[in-house]
Amino acid sequence: MKEESLRTLKGIGEKTEKLFERAGVGNLNQLLHYYPRDYDSYEQTVPLGMVRDNEKNAVCGRILRQPSVKNYNHKSVTILQLEDETGKLQITWFHMPFLKSTLKRGGSYIFRGRVSMKNGRKTMEHPEIFTIAGYDEIQGQLRPIYPLTTGLTNKMVIKAVSQLLEERSLEPEYLPEEQRERLRLCEINYAIAEIHFPSDRNSLAEARRRLVFDEFFFFILALSRLKEKTETVENHFPMRAVWRTEEVIENLPYRLTDAQMGVWNELERDMTGRLLMNRLIQGDVGSGKTILAFLSMIMCCENGYQSALMVPTEVLAVQHYESLCRLLEENQITDARPVLLKGSCTQKEKREIYEKIASGETKMIVGTHALIQEKVVYRDLALVITDEQHRFGVRQRTLLTEKGYPPNVLVMSATPIPRTLAIILYGDLDISVLNELPARRLPIKNCVVGTSWRPNAYQFMEREITAGHQVYVICPMVEENEELNCENVMDYSSRLRERMPAGIRVEPLHGQMKAQKKNEIMEAFAANEIQILVSTTVVEVGVNVPNATVMLIENAERFGLAQLHQLRGRVGRGEAQSYCIFMQGDEKEETSRRLDILNRSNDGFYIAEEDLKLRGPGDLFGIRQSGIADFQIADIYQDADILKESSAAVREILELDPELKLPQNRLLSEALEHYLERQNADILL
Ligand code: ADP
Ligand code: MG
């Protein structure tokens, strides 16, 4: 049943299937593992006199008067006055005039929705409606909230998942019984059912722990098996150190930092060595990793080999390609003939590029995942670099190596991971740390402010733009969403456009745009034809526009600290003073305390550690900190302890049975195969 289509479920036709596909759910198995991102709980009702602003409340009250229906700008608004012994509350709905006859005067109901001040009056907008008996039944339950894309509603996912849970045949438990008991891990089918529809907070915590464990466990298991294969592989691409790279370093408009020099020496040594390079460079945002990648590529080219630079987004691919071309030109390196390979190339363009790669005419390839598609046949691929990818997929590497001799591998990541964890996560890699920012860089100035400060922020942005600089504004959403009360890129950019003087060009950018459009906007921003870029977190990774000096992050409370730190890294990349304004959209004390950590420090390691301390290990359902899609439910910071347990468990099993050939590990070995297949599928998306 695993790979069966969603269409086998009742109520899912072609259209709905497409919606699910867009959210990355293409078959029943993926649906089963499409975990909620949060849970909503039906809490006890609060007296009207005690409702909390800007939060969801459930209230119970009597209806004073028959609801009235008014029309504003073609919108019909139903208005209701609710009352209890402690106070009154106004409730409104848009486009639901029929409520007028359903909600009777004198009747008592329960309403559940967000309360805010509207025209000086406490108002609940668009709440759910329950009878008192109906609410009684569900009170205390946790309702899943799924990650959604346009058109896909939470209700649709809930319906599909509950049907699937009822009808599916159970999975065999693949973890050895003895180990499962010792580690106090619940059974896998129980975990899956509870993660979707938890009975209570405790079982949810248990379910989550098991699934996090599994996620780490299979990752480490796959890694350990790979490690044996790659650890002592001979390098089939003998290389010498070359003068060219020394010249390039001499010609740079800046001096490499000592840290950069140190790592460059390591790379040179690796690539001239007898064994294959497998190295991770860990360096905070702005530490200057890109130039090291370029130098390695030049060294390969001088030795007559090909190299490929892989990145997660097309925006970043274009940017890297252009800076690489510039660097080659400045140094009159003409034999590299770099190509840019990206998903949005036409078939014809792709074919031409593939030919150039196959013939060996081109020596440098920059691109997104499309790079590893089966059609690409490399001539002499001696080096693969992945930037901002955090990790080179276990399968990606094997895919590439199937086409020739295995290449040297260099992974570059800005994610600050404590060394003990890095050793587990990157078990198969040597680690270099770039622990120094280029000199002449002024530290970013930060502030955390409430939304009432927005006019000042705009004035400040205008001033910086007048001085020739540029601004990023980050919003958590692409479009308006009635359930979530937060800023979105589309509305925000039109509002800002009106607010700013005519000479300032404001443009939106988000992940749902066509790749071509995204590239155009990024290029125009890089050329300072756009002064304010209003964007989602698509600019989070790697984007480099040193002339941008201000970043304003709206609804900062909605992002993890590590992610905010990554975002902030888009400014402070040039010599001018840069600023980051964290706009706090809620008034929670806890948020202020978390954001203050960013305010105090620009050091990614410090931030990750402090954040962990503040949250404590009990906080299971907070925002995922790493903001990296590698793990679906696990979080390397928050779940560091489970990570260590998984690692120990893998070691134990492999010590007894390195090939997973013993009968007691048969199910496990099958589960590992499934895991690898899933990984593979992800990569080829
Ligand atoms: P990251 O490590 O975040 O990928 P980049 O490689 O994009 O950082 O570098 C950020 C900026 O710093 C780029 O504009 C780059 O040209 C510049 N840069 C890199 N190394 C140095 C250096 N040693 N001195 C000054 N500027 C540098
Ligand atoms: Mg980078």
Image: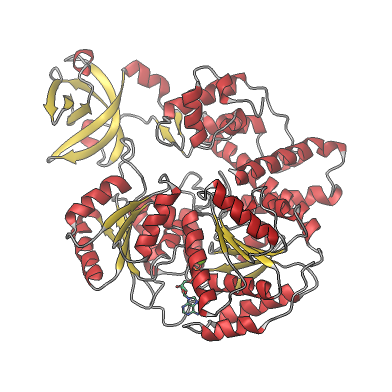
Q: Is residue 401 visible?
A: yes
User: Residue 543: percent from the left, percent from the top?
Assistant: 45, 62
Q: Establish if 462 lies above or below 14.
A: below
The quarter of the rendered structure image containing the C terminus is: top right
Q: Establish if 50 lies above or below 127.
A: below
User: Residue 469: percent from the left, percent from the top?
Assistant: 29, 70
Quarter of the image for residue 145 reads top left
* Residue situated in front as seen by the camera: 548 or 448: 548
The quarter of the rendered structure image containing the N terminus is: top right
User: Residue 367: percent from the left, percent from the top?
Assistant: 56, 57
Q: Is residue 659 left or right of residue 398?
A: right
Q: Establish if 213 lies above or below 284.
A: above
Q: Residue at x 56, y 44 (%)?
A: 632
Q: Residue at x 17, y 26 (%)?
A: 77
Q: Is residue 487 visible?
A: no
User: Residue 167: percent from the left, percent from the top?
Assistant: 61, 19
* Residue situated in front as seen by the camera: 416 or 615: 416
Q: Is residue 564 left or right of residue 426?
A: left
Quarter of the image for residue 377 reads bottom right
Quarter of the image for residue 429 reads bottom right
Q: Residue at x 54, y 34 (%)?
A: 25
* Residue situated in front as seen by the camera: 153 or 493: 493
